[in-house]
Image: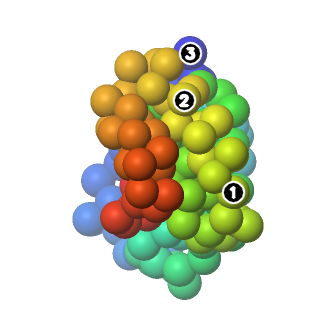
């Protein structure tokens, strides 16, 4: 079970920079939920410059702690080659892990990868 004690603050009440700072602080403390959120912020370029490499790094941190959503997102990045070298084997590995935790979207992504070789969108 991932270490996920992160309680999402009301980020709308904060400046984007302050919100990112708060999330980053919790992510650096090892909170899987905050690591996932920070990865999404990098992926979307919300409050910071879009950075697929950083998104992949933070998704990997949360994925290693057992976050199925982060595992699936990391699989998407590997499938599309965003922030990491495109690697179908790695994408499959992460989709399988997430699917094993019951994430339906990961099963769908695994099926798409095996049938088509790529996915629609890399958004988490």
Picture residue at 48% right of the left edge, 45% below the top: 114
Q: Work out whether residue 33 or residue 104 is closer to the camera in this orientation and state it.
A: 104
In terms of sequence position, does the residue under pointer 2 or pointer 3 come before the other? 3
Q: Is residue 123 above or below residue 50?
A: above
Q: Position of residue 76 (x, y in %)?
A: 50, 54
Residue 1 image label: 3
Q: Is residue 28 above or below residue 44?
A: above
Which SS class for mark 2?
Answer: helix
Q: Report if the CB atoms under discs 1 and 3 are less than 8 Å apart.
A: no
Q: Position of residue 111 (x, y in %)?
A: 39, 40
Q: Work out whether residue 118 or residue 32 is closer to the camera in this orientation and state it.
A: 118
Callout 2: few (<14), some (14-19), or many (20+) C-alpha neighbours within 10 Å?
A: many
Which residue does the numbered mark 1 point to in the structure image? 87
Picture residue at 52% right of the left edge, 37% below the top: 95
Picture residue at 46% right of the left edge, 61% below the top: 118
Q: Report if the CB atoms under discs 2 and 3 are less than 8 Å apart.
A: no
Judge left or right: residue 103 versus residue 41.
left
> Closer to the observer: label 2 or label 3?
2
What distance separates the C-alpha of mark 1 from that of mark 2? 14 Å
Picture residue at 60% right of the left edge, 70% below the top: 82
Which SS class for mark 3?
Answer: loop
Q: Work out whether residue 29 or residue 102 is closer to the camera in this orientation and state it.
A: 102
Which residue does the numbered mark 2 point to in the structure image? 96
In terms of sequence position, does the residue under pointer 1 or pointer 2 come before the other? 1
């Amino acid at each position: 079970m991932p270490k996920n004690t992160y309680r999402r603050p009301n980020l709308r009440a904060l400046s984007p920079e302050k919100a990112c700072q708060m999330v980053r602080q919790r992510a650096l403390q090892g909170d899987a939920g905050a690591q996932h959120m920070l990865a999404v912020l990098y992926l979307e370029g919300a409050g910071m410059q879009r950075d697929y490499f950083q998104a992949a790094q933070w998704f990997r941190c949360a994925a290693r702690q057992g976050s199925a959503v982060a595992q699936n997102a990391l699989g998407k990045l590997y499938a599309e080659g965003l922030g990491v070298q495109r690697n179908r084997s790695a994408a499959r590995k992460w989709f399988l892990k997430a699917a094993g935790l019951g994430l339906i979207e990961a099963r769908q992504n695994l099926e798409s990868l095996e049938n088509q070789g790529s996915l629609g969108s890399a958004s988490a």
